[in-house]
């Protein structure tokens, strides 16, 4: 069963808000397995005036953050839960992060994230980002869900 999510469903499933919400739509989601999502990159992004004014490029750390947000959507759908004020989704590690081409205004980032392993609240994912079918970035992400006071 493949699930799709529009921005309203994403806002219900992630605590992130502007300017830090970096996922616009979920195209496919198979709980416990994988997810495909997208981000439309526009010149109106708040980071472009400073990175770089003469040649705007999306910061790599934000591409990795977007991958983690997509992974969080997969995690919450797989656990059949939505985060609340006491639920926080943390990075636990990032391995093998590589950046293959810059991301510019007008690009549409497609994220493909696969759940590799889930054990005792720790999740490991293989994630890639593409623009026009070309690999833009890749990383292995480890994340955990914690309840805070």
Image: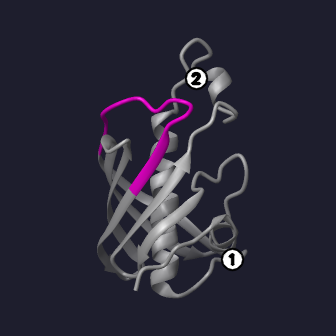
Residue drawn 63% across and 73% down? 13
Contact, mark 2 vs mark 1 (Cβ under 8 Å): no
Q: Which residue is mark 1?
A: 86
Q: Which one is in front, 83 or 3?
A: 3
Residue drawn 52% across and 32% down? 58
Q: Report the mark closest to the observer, 2 or 1.
A: 2
Label for residue 47?
A: none
Name the spot of residue 130 as percent of width and height, x first. Answer: 36, 45
> Who comes first in sequence, dot 2 or dot 1?
2
Q: Which one is in front, 91 or 63?
A: 63
Q: Quadrant of the C terminus?
A: bottom right
Highlighted magenta segment, given as a residue range: 97-111
SS assignment at label 1: loop
Residue drawn 56% across and 61% down? 25
Q: Which residue is mark 2?
A: 51
Residue drawn 52% across and 78% down? 76
Q: Quadrant of the N terminus?
A: bottom left
SS assignment at label 2: loop
CA gap, disc 2 to disc 1?
Answer: 34 Å
């Amino acid at each position: 069963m493949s699930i799709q999510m529009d921005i309203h469903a994403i806002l219900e499933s992630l605590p992130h808000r502007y300017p830090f919400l970096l996922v616009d739509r979920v195209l496919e989601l198979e709980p416990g397995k994988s997810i495909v999502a997208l981000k439309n990159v526009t010149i109106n992004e708040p980071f472009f005036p400073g990175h770089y004014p003469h040649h705007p490029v999306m910061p790599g750390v934000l591409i990795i953050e977007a991958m983690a947000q997509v992974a969080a959507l997969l995690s919450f759908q797989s656990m059949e839960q939505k985060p609340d004020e006491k639920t926080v989704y943390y990075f636990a590690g990032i391995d093998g992060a590589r950046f293959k081409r810059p991301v510019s205004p007008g690009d549409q980032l497609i994220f493909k994230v696969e759940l590799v392993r889930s054990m005792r609240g720790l999740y490991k994912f293989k994630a890639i980002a593409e623009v026009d079918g070309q690999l833009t970035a890749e990383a292995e992400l480890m994340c955990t869900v914690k309840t805070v006071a």
